[in-house]
Image (cartoon, rainbow, N blue to C red):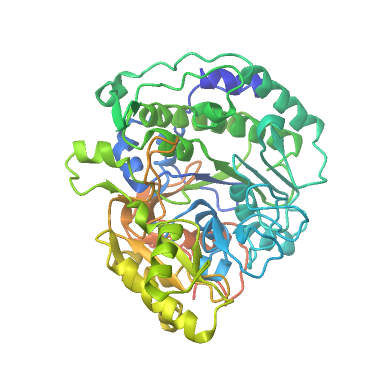
């Protein structure tokens, strides 16, 4: 069904990709770089399904495979993760420390700031905002490419604004992301092109129709059973059936990725990407896996169906590029991993899996602090039961010190909290170095630390504590921890006739920028980039520049 949806929108996508034979890769740079982030595509998901892929993901495994990639920081959320992929920098340097953080200086009642908003727009909030790239502190690959050769074209398309913006950066030709009932759009004031209007019209036709449940592949039968997450609430048997016009159900389904790929395929033709004198860059943010993980968990029938369709849709997209005769190179990774819902984890031998205690939410901690200190009002603030916690700057120095001490003690007293770091401890910690799998929790948290934006405390929960207290509200599972199920992601590189290699080193997503730069002969600054080039040539010859 999803493949026919892609074909409906683009008119020519084929059904399945045919893996190329391993021969000698061209010595010249590719004409098009295609960088794909599959939101919440953990290394665990890749390992579970990699032998079952037959389409696009099977093709990518014939290239250079790094199954042990890392989003190495602690704040394993969508915005920080996407900020690492094409900047070569960890969140502590990109400035994108979380999806949201607290900024007590903004001139509005809502002190929560969304990572891709402009908080200076009158009347805006972190939920009703004008999209902006102003918080990203560093350049992206597209910017470096356009600085080196203005003829390079850079296009970014995603299901989420933060994915398109953080990977696209500031210097690009077109940027589009899904904006709900209106379909794909761009920054405020950017007119929708006739091509995007046409794609949006096609998507609307599909949305306006009721969708029956998708077929359950034989390989998904074993995980097809309901899991109770709350009284009279269960997940696991929906199979993506939805009512006409249900946009939320559309996002949490394989058709959401198909829509992004359909627009991208049309833009390749419309913008003649890969057909000019310079290398072009196409950036894709596929968000459906993330919404499926949040809505149904990572181990059930819905995720299995999503993996089958993701593989097929990517295969169809690559076939379209093949048919156009484009010399392209693909990089695929993820912004973070994910954890299955605790109820199913407990059924599958993870007896310590649990939901977070509501007493760890900022309002509850604030009430406890009021009782401890005798101080009234808002003493601390945060965006959830873990991560960055901010002490009210209106307090006196003595009051702030008291609140900080008592707040840390309250968090550490919880059996669900692993550790708590202060702003001072993180500021004094050395910069991350060495293999990311060997880092301490302090180093992992340091990788997300920005002196101006990070909290007065950073709270890290114990493994398998899901920071959603109530699973009946729509989302049953999530991510954001410093543990490997959230940090580890696959990193795949593929080009036609590329010689296969698999390297189980613990590499980082920040290594993607310098690795791709080497592939196209792009010279990067010698300082200010955390990542390092990774050799994609399995012979004695290195694909990285000599040091």
Residue reaching furthest to the bottom: 398
Which of the two residues, 469 or 346, is positioned nearer the viewer here?
Answer: 469
Q: Residue at x 65, y 63 (%)?
A: 135
Residue 237: image x %, image y %? 35, 21
Establish if 447 lies above or below 82: below
Q: Residue at x 43, y 84 (%)?
A: 428
Residue 493: image x %, image y %? 47, 48
Asked whether the viewer can see residue 445, the reply is yes
Residue 488: image x %, image y %? 36, 54
Q: Residue at x 58, y 32 (%)?
A: 322
Residue 168: image x %, image y %? 65, 53
Query: Would you say 179 lies left or right of 220 here?
Result: right
Quadrant of residue 137 within the rendered picture: bottom right
Q: Residue at x 71, y 57 (%)?
A: 118
Asked whether the viewer can see residue 30, the reply is no
Establish if 248 lies above or below 29: above
Which of the two residues, 106 or 27, is positioned nearer the viewer here?
Answer: 106
Counting labels gives 0
């Amino acid at each position: 069904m999803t493949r026919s949806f892609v074909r409906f929108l683009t008119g020519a996508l084929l059904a399945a990709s045919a893996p190329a034979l391993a021969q000698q890769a061209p010595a010249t740079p590719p004409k098009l770089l295609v960088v794909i982030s599959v939101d919440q595509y953990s290394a665990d998901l890749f390992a579970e399904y990699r032998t079952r892929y037959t389409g696009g993901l099977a093709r990518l495994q014939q290239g250079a495979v790094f199954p042990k990639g890392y989003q190495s920081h602690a704040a394993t959320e969508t915005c920080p993760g996407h900020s690492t992929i094409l900047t070569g920098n960890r969140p502590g340097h990109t400035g994108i420390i979380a999806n949201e953080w607290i900024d007590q200086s903004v001139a509005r009642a809502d002190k929560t700031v969304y990572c891709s908003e402009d908080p200076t727009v009158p009347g805006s909030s972190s939920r009703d905002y004008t999209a902006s790239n102003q918080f990203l502190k560093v350049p992206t690959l597209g910017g470096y490419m356009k600085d080196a050769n203005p003829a390079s074209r850079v296009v970014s398309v995603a299901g989420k604004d933060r994915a398109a913006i953080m990977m696209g950066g500031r210097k690009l030709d077109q940027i589009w992301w899904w904006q709900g009932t209106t379909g794909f759009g761009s920054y405020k004031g950017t007119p929708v092109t006739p091509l995007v209007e046409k794609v949006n019209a096609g998507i609307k036709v599909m949305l306006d129709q009721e969708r029956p449940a998708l077929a359950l592949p034989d390989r998904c039968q074993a995980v097809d059973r309901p899991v109770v997450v709350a009284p009279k609430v269960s997940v696991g048997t929906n199979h993506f059936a939805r009512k006409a016009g249900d946009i939320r159900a559309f996002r949490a389904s394989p058709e959401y990725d198909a829509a992004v790929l359909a627009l991208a395929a049309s833009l390749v033709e419309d913008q003649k990407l890969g057909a000019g004198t310079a290398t072009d860059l196409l950036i894709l943010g596929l968000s459906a896996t993330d919404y499926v993980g949040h809505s149904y968990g990572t181990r059930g029938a819905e995720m299995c169906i999503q993996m089958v369709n993701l593989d097929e849709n990517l295969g169809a997209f690559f076939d379209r590029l093949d048919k156009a005769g484009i010399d392209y190179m693909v990089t695929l990774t993820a912004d973070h991993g994910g954890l299955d819902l605790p109820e199913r984890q407990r059924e599958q031998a993870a007896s310590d899996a649990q939901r977070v205690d509501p007493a760890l939410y900022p309002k509850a901690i604030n009430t406890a602090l009021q009782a401890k200190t005798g101080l009234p009002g808002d003493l601390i603030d945060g965006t959830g039961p873990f991560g960055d916690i901010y002490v009210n700057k209106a307090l006196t120095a003595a009051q702030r010190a008291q609140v900080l001490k008592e707040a840390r003690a309250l968090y550490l007293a919880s059996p669900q909290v692993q550790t708590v770091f202060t702003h001072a401890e993180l500021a004094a910690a050395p910069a991350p170095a060495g293999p990311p799998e060997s880092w301490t929790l302090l180093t992992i948290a340091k990788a997300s630390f920005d002196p101006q934006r990070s909290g007065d405390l950073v709270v890290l929960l114990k493994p398998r504590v899901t920071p959603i207290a109530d699973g009946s509200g729509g989302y049953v599972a999530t991510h954001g921890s410093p543990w490997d199920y959230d940090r580890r992601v696959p990193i795949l590189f593929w080009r036609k006739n590329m010689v296969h290699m698999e390297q189980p080193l613990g590499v980082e997503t920040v290594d993607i920028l310098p690795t791709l730069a080497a592939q196209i002969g792009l010279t990067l600054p010698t300082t200010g980039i955390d990542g390092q080039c990774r050799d994609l040539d399995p012979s004695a010859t290195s694909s990285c520049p000599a040091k």
